[in-house]
Amino acid sequence: MAQATETYYDRDFWAKENLRYVEPHFRLEKSARIVRKVASGRECDLLDVGCGPATLMRLVGPNIRYHGIDIAVQRPASNLRELDFVENPIRFGDKRFDIIVAQGVFEYIGRCQAQKFAEIRDILHEGGTFIVTYVNFDHRNRNIYWPYNNIQGFAEFRSSLQQFFRIERYFPTSHRWQHDEPRGRIMRALQQPVNFNIPLLSRWLAVEYFFICRKKS
C-alpha cells in the first residue's frame, strides 16, 4: 500500500488540531470504557500517549492515576508532559505503567513505528495492557486524512505490533459504510458496546481497530 509523504507536523499545528478533541468523541468514549474494564476497579497508573487536551482523564475514574504526553499540552500540569515523542523517547520520567493508551497516534509515526512500539513495551509493567488504535486502511471507501504519514493495511500493522506485543484481541471501533465515526445518538449508542469482529463485514466496514495487547515475556 502506498505511503503518504513522510511529513511531521510541529507543535503549532497540533496545538490547534488538539482543540478539536476537547469534548469526548466516539472513539475516546469507547477507549475509556475499555480502560475501565481493564482496570476492573483496581488502582492503576495509566499513560496516554498523544493525549491532546487530556480529555480521557475526565472519563476513566478515580482509581486511574492518569499521565499524559503530547507535543502540545494545552494546560500544563504535574501529570502532563509536553514532549515531541517522534524526536524523543516515549517516557514519563522513570515511571512504568499498568495501562498505556495510544489512540490516533500511529497514523502519524511514519518511519518510527517499530522504535515507538519498543519504547512503549519498555515502560509497560509485566502483565500490563497496551491499548492502541489504528485506522482501517482496507475500508471499502478509504478516507485518508491529509496529515497521515504512516499508511498501511491491517495485516501489515498487526504484524509489526506482534513483534513487540502479544495481541490478546482486536475489534473495530465502529462499522460504517462511510469511513468516519458514528455521529447520530442512536448509532453511537448501538456501536459503543460492540467489541467483536463481524466476519467479512469488519474487513470492509471497520472504521478503525482497537488492539488490546500484553507485553511479550
Image (tube, grey):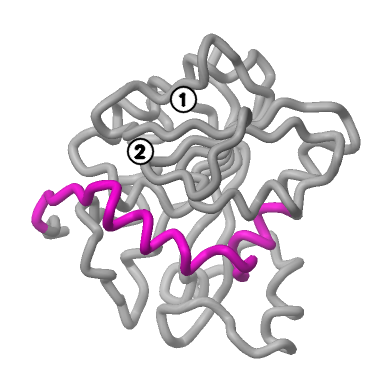
**Above or below for 87 versus 22:** above
Please rate how many residues cluster around mark 1, counting C-alpha atoms within 10 Å: few if below 14, some from 14 to 19, many from 20: many
Q: Nearer the viewer, residue 81 or 99?
A: 81
Please rate how many residues cluster around mark 2, counting C-alpha atoms within 10 Å: few if below 14, some from 14 to 19, many from 20: few
In this view, the residue farthest toward the right is 41
The residue shown at (42%, 74%) is 204
Q: Is residue 93 visible?
A: yes
Q: Is residue 100 visible?
A: no
Specify the segment rendered in magenta. 5-32
- Image spot of residue 136 (x, y percent): 39, 63
* Residue at which label 2 appears: 159
- Image spot of residue 157 (x, y percent): 34, 45
Instruction: Indicate the quadrant containing the C terminus: top left, top right, bottom left or bottom right.
Output: top right
The residue shown at (61%, 44%) is 169
Amino acid type for the residue under numbered disc 1 = Ile
Check contact, mark 2 vs mark 1: CB within 8 A.
Answer: no
Q: What type of secondary structure mainly makes up the magenta span?
A: helix
- Image spot of residue 37 (x, y percent): 81, 45
Q: CA distance from mark 2 to mark 1?
A: 17 Å
* Residue at which label 1 appears: 120
Amino acid type for the residue under numbered disc 2 = Ser
Q: Nearer the viewer, residue 138 or 51?
A: 51
The residue shown at (46%, 76%) is 205
